[in-house]
Image (cartoon, grey):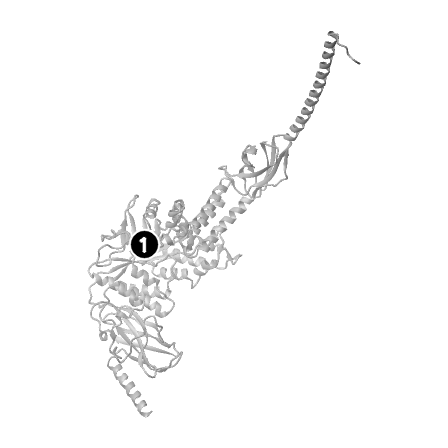
Amino acid sequence: MRRSLTLCVAAFTLLGLLSALGGVPATASLSAAPAADTPDPVRISLTRVSPSILTEKDNLIIAGSVANASFTEFDDVMVQLRLSNGPLANRAQLGRVTAGNPSWDGDVVSGSTVSVAGVLGVGGRAQFRIELPASALPVSTAGAYSLGVEVVASDGGNYDRRGMARTLLPWMPTSQQLSPTRLAWIWPLADSPSRDERGVLLGERTQEEISLGGRLRNLVEIGAKNSTDVTWLADPALLQTVQAMTQGYLVDIDGNVEPGTRSGQARTWITLLNDATSQGAQSSMWVLPYADVDAGGLHHNGLDRDLVRAITTASPTASDALGHTPQGGLAWAPSGGFDPGTIETLAGTGVRVVVMRDSALPATDSAITPTGSAELDTADGPLRAILLDTGLRESLSMRQQTSTQILLARQRFLAELAFVAMEAPSIPRTLIAGPSSPRWDPSGALLRDLMRVIHTTSWIDPVPLSVVLADAPSAIPRTVAPYVGQSMELPKYYFDHIKQAQNKLTSLSTVLADPTSLTEPALATLLRAESTAWRFHISDGEELINSVDSALNNIQNSIHVISRNDVILSGDTGSIPVTIANDLDQQVTVGLRLVGTPTARLDAQTVTDIVIEPGKRASVVVPVRVVGSESVQVAVQLLDGNDTQFGKSSAMQLQTTAYSRAARWFTIGAAILLALMVLFDIYRRVRHRRRKQSSLLETGSVINT
């Protein structure tokens, strides 16, 4: 026992000496690291990686905590750094490191090992802090390095790695001569446009997101503090909704409509945005098509007119909400790209800028990352494509729930910029930074950190989108990648439902004296139902369509035929009186048509231009002719201005007595004819008998009596 204790003490003493000399080496003294997909028994949380971009004048500080997530107690717990053996070779490796790939873990950094705890019990936690001067790090070539934070400990038998956290460290010495990399930030503001034709919010999402601490509030507050460095892209439907909320609003929560309580938050939000984007008579804001409609889905389902409406109403709608006119003619590709047909349609409606992913237009042969601006040829002239950089976009899309995740996303973003700057230090280029979706939900801490670093880094030059558009597009050739987004578009049956509602709306608009009060909110709601927001929440979009459909049905049902009993005509022709009621608060003009079953049995005149005042009834007399003696099933149909049926038809039975009277006269006539025939037969017989008697007398025949 004493011998075992002596050996353990000796082992720990040796480990301490190794730590002092440069850390526990990655040799046979440690068993193989756990597989990448095996949860670490000791979890590492990073709270500080400073500075974000290392220069030769800095001290590197890594701080955080370790937590024992296993059921084993660990002894002599230490944390140390590992650094890749040189900068990473390409941008793809940056993503692999942040995904946990151990291929670039490198060696332990000499002097980086610190003791964390003598004993780390089950569920135990301990803090750590490592600080080293840049001169102590094995870095020479500028670039992005893989930086690992490793925890090693003994479980009573083996001394081994118990946990690993990886991040990226840009090393950019001040002596490095670099042409500044221009960075254009795309800063979208969009939500799920759940507002029905009554102006009622369906759910609490929007009011929560614009309130203090909400997603949209954070984006506006952070963007407002950096308004000269970001380019705002807003959904006009969102601006319209928030502006309406400032005057008081209603919200439908689980079927209960009640007054909203956040009008003050709406006023604060719209004021912050207005102040950040108005620049005298100009605006630094661009607007998306209204509701960020699914352009590809609309085009592929024959609804180009809706796409035109969404684009042409975007700027006026936003202007009404903000008080200044933003720039229009921009569309966002929700799946990264557009197919050629949709691009032609967009160009034909006045769109001059499309935001796409660079993977939709890959460079054909380039050893460096090209500027994220290209030109597309269309029948209506060139269309500028602003291309979101894949590495920056993926950085903003990384998980951001914990401090470790936020730091990792920040370091990935900055490492991507550093790598591009070092690809060709003397060639200036412009990268486009933006999220995968306009409805992004970034961490406020991440955005604030990135903005702070960008402002203090000499080789990063933030510019607005207007500067990018003023320059010529990149001359590096690009190819158009096959469009792969059609399967993600809103489905055909969904658009068919919208078309049915639109047809019903068109019909009603020819009936109402003042259809504007109906058509404008209904059409806007159907545009909101066509938003790309519903691609992955389709039931919420269907709720908007159903809301419009229900409202239209209620209006149709308010113009109806008063039901009546069966009608009996005294002849085969006659007139049928029909009463039509208008329960609406405006005048309507309808037509009336009677249709028999079968149709050949009834010939009825169609009546048009029946004007009915609000809340009144109108009686109409319809001339008809009936063929046949049996009763006829008649459908009474109301017609719109295009002589097309609208609403439900009313049914009646139509009978005629004309054929029963004809049958009676026929019977009487037949009886008279039969009587005449009998009398004629009697007369003929009598006459024949008399002739016979006269003939016998003349020949002398004897007649016996």
Q: Is residue 254 left or right of residue 532?
A: right
Q: Residue at x 29, y 78 (%)?
A: 31
| Image location of residue 354, percent across then percent down | 32, 51
> Quarter holding the C terminus?
top right
- Kindly identify which residue carries mark 1: 356
In the image, what residue type sits under mark 1? Met
Q: Position of residue 514 (x, y in %)?
A: 50, 41
**Secondary element at image label 1:** strand
Q: Which quadrant of the figure has residue 624? A: top right
What's the residue at 52%, 49% (across, down)?
Answer: 550
Residue 557 lies, in percent from the top left, at 55, 45
Examine the rendering and report whether any part of residue 14 can be seen: yes
As drawn, 215 above or below 403: above
Q: Is residue 251 left or right of residue 85?
A: right
User: Taking 694 as reference, is 14 above or below it?
Assistant: below
Task: In this rendered view, identify the residue nearer to me: 231 or 346.
Answer: 346
**Residue 445, image quadrant:** bottom left
